[in-house]
Image (cartoon, helix red, strand yellow):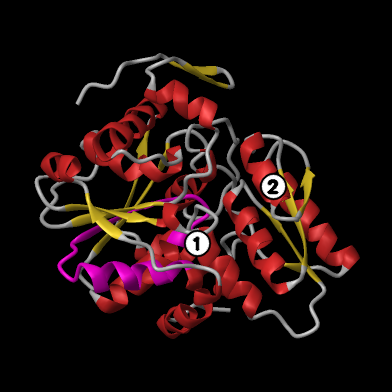
């Protein structure tokens, strides 16, 4: 299968059954840092608190008639989206997750009526269980990113960005499995070929970044991160998102846990917003000077708000945070 711009355009009508058109708002503080208008696309305003509702809704409304249930693997937000869409359609949903997924995200999925399977300590382990359920129990698998319907649903963000800000020059996209980045890049470059689309991810367990550097999908070790939604592999048999990200992204950059910590504080204190660590990697990259010359308006996507509030409170209070074998030393926010 391939993904075409027409698929993204068609998804616009499908996703209205679950998703909303999210606001694009300016960040005065980040505009001063960037030297140009800096916008935040608030996918945190979605009914499930994350952009994943777009791809999941588009995938589920296109399921074959008579489908009894669905399964997926997830680091949190995709599972929540599938659970939400399945409940609306009266379908059974089984979400497979690794032990690295925060409890808050697991509880949120169960609250929507889905079954949760905790399997192993990596996204690959969870994927194996989801594939088993599809084979042995006849459930329809809804991949978190490497699926044409899912990519098309996420790509609707690219259309909305350029409808709301036609002058946009750069889009900073949180990068994990690549469904969001691939969809946005395809849509944005179809509408405005000269626009820059840059993937941003954490420097620990960056699967797509490492795969693009290697020239093929590679496995990486997953470790705890403030940007836990960006964790997980892309699959060594990746069919769509690897090639699309390799060909469509203008660059991929890494940010450290300390820079993500600072960016979470920045968003909270300067824009009065609560968001996951994965949401702020674009802010982190600009503050760290990783984006290079910024020549015009820039936007980033606040991808979700389904975070562990205990960790978030520690971050914005300037307390130390321990992530597995790594401790981020506490630091009070300094504008």
| Label ID, residue 124 | 2
- Say above or below: 55 vs 112: below
Asked if residue 55 can be seen in this view, the reply is yes
- The structure residue drawn at horizontal position 39% and vertical position 14%, both measured from the top left corner, is 330
- The structure residue drawn at horizontal position 43% and vertical position 48%, both measured from the top left corner, is 213
Left or right: 5 with respect to 194? right
Q: Secondary structure at mark 2?
A: helix
Q: Is residue 183 magenta?
A: no
Q: Position of residue 288 (x, y in %)?
A: 24, 33
Q: Position of residue 42 (x, y in %)?
A: 36, 55
Viewer-side label of 1, 2: 1
Question: How far apart in space, not on screen, are marks 1 and 2 (Cα)?
Answer: 17 Å
- Say above or below: 54 vs 319: below
Asked if residue 147 can be seen in this view, the reply is no
Quadrant where the N terminus is found in the figure: bottom right
The quadrant where residue 94 appears? bottom right
Left or right: 29 with respect to 299? left
Choose between 326 and 19: the one closer to the eye: 19
Quadrant where the C terminus is found in the figure: top left
Discs 1, 2 touching: Cβ within 8 Å: no
Part of the protein shown in magenta: 154-180
Q: Looking at the image, is mark 1 or mark 2 earlier in the sequence? A: 2
Q: Secondary structure at mark 1?
A: helix
Q: Is residue 174 magenta?
A: yes
The quadrant where residue 34 appears? top left
Left or right: 231 with respect to 172? right
Choose between 292 and 73: the one closer to the eye: 73
Q: Position of residue 162 (x, y in %)?
A: 25, 70
Residue at numbered disc 1: 179
- The structure residue drawn at horizontal position 47% and vertical position 54%, both measured from the top left corner, is 215
Choose between 85 and 96: the one closer to the eye: 85
């Amino acid at each position: 299968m391939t993904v075409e711009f027409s698929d993204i355009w068609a998804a616009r009508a499908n996703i209205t059954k679950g998703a909303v058109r999210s606001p694009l708002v300016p960040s005065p503080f980040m505009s001063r840092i960037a030297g140009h208008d800096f916008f935040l696309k608030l996918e945190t305003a979605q009914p499930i608190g994350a952009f994943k509702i777009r791809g999941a809704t588009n995938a589920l409304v296109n399921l074959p008639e008579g489908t009894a249930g669905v399964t997926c693997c997830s680091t949190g937000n995709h599972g929540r989206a599938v659970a939400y869409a399945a409940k609306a359609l009266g379908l059974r949903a089984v979400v497979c997750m690794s032990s690295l997924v925060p409890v808050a995200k697991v509880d949120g999925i169960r609250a929507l009526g889905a079954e949760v399977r905790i399997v192993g300590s990596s996204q690959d382990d969870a994927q194996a269980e989801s594939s088993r359920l599809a084979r042995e129990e006849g459930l329809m698998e809804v991949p978190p990113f490497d699926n044409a319907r899912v990519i098309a649903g996420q790509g609707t963000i690219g259309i909305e960005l350029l409808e709301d800000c036609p002058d946009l020059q750069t889009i900073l996209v949180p990068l994990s499995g690549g469904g969001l980045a691939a969809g946005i890049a395809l849509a944005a470059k179809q509408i405005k070929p000269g626009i820059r689309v840059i993937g941003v991810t954490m420097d620990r367990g960056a699967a797509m970044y490492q795969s693009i550097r290697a020239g093929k999908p590679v496995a990486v070790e997953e470790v705890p991160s403030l940007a836990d939604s960006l964790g997980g592999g892309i699959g060594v048999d990746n069919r769509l998102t690897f090639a699309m990200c390799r060909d469509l992204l203008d660059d991929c950059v890494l940010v450290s846990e300390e820079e993500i910590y600072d960016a979470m504080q920045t968003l909270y204190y300067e824009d009065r917003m609560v968001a996951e660590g994965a949401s702020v990697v674009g802010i982190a990259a600009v503050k760290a000077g990783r984006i290079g010359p910024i020549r015009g308006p820039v936007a980033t996507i606040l991808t979700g708000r389904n975070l562990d509030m205990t960790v978030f409170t520690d971050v914005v209070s300037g307390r130390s945070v321990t992530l597995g074998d790594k401790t981020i030393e506490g630091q009070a926010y300094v504008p």
